[in-house]
Image (spheres, rainbow, N blue to C red):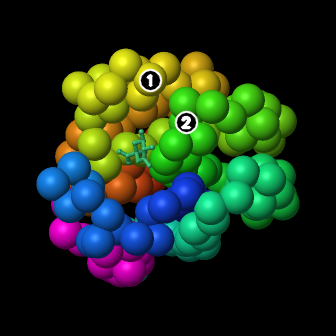
Amino acid sequence: MNILVIHGPNLHLLGKRQPEIYGHQTLEDINAALDRQAAASPHDVMLKIFQSNHEGEIVSVIGGHINWADGVLINPAAYTHTSIAIRDAISTVALPVIEIHLSNIYAREAFRHHSYISAVALGVIGGFGAQSYTLALEAMIQHLQAG
Ligand code: DQA
């Protein structure tokens, strides 16, 4: 199973960025944990991992993997709350998508309470810090395995 992982804007600075909210783990730590989890899986899991600060690039990466990916894990970061373009890209590829957040967006500022992505996602995992990603990968593997 081929799983595309996308990290949105400002997530390249994890570890330095507001660690009281986002934790001390760097993006490299999170990616390494995902790679270990994929390698340890009894299923044949291939990951491609991207980070971008640019909305259009994220749209292109999603669309560009329509024939490769079986599922997508995405932390759209601030674009969660603004991007119809990323939502449309997800609807276009019609792949199962899990929306991820490190923080619990519903326990934060009101402008973070609305997600343009959730309605087109298979599910949403947030509030568990770096573990949100590993929980999401496990959920995606189980979903694809069942299908
Ligand atoms: C985030 C939550 C968003 O509101 C914020 O803009 C981010 C990160 C999270 O992972 O908790 O950049 O997606």
Measure the alpha-carbon separation of dots 1 and 2.
10 Å
Quarter location, residue 42: bottom left
144 vs 10: above or below: above
Stretch in magenta = 23-36
Q: Residues within 10 Å of mark 1 (few under 14, many from 20)?
A: few
Q: Is residue 26 highlighted in magenta?
A: yes
Query: Chief secondary structure of the magenta span?
Result: helix
Does any portion of residue 1 appear in the rendered image? no
Of the image marks 1 and 2, the number of the one nearer the N terminus: 2
Does label 2 point to a residue whose CB lies under 8 Å from ligand 1?
yes
* Residue plotted at (48% across, 61% down): 10
* Residue plotted at (35% across, 55% down): 133
Q: Secondary structure at mark 2?
A: helix
Q: How many numbered marks have been drawn onto this rendered protein structure? A: 2
Q: Which residue is mark 1?
A: 111
What amino acid type should be assigned to the residue bearing mark 1?
A: Phe
Disc 1 or disc 2, which is closer to the eye? 1
Q: Which residue is mark 2?
A: 80
Quadrant of ligand 1 in image:
top left
How far across and how far down the image is residue 139, in percent? 38, 45
Residue at the extreme left: 20
Quarter location, residue 106: top left
How far across and how far down the image is residue 74, in percent? 53, 50
Q: Are marks 1 and 2 in contact (CB under 8 Å)?
A: no
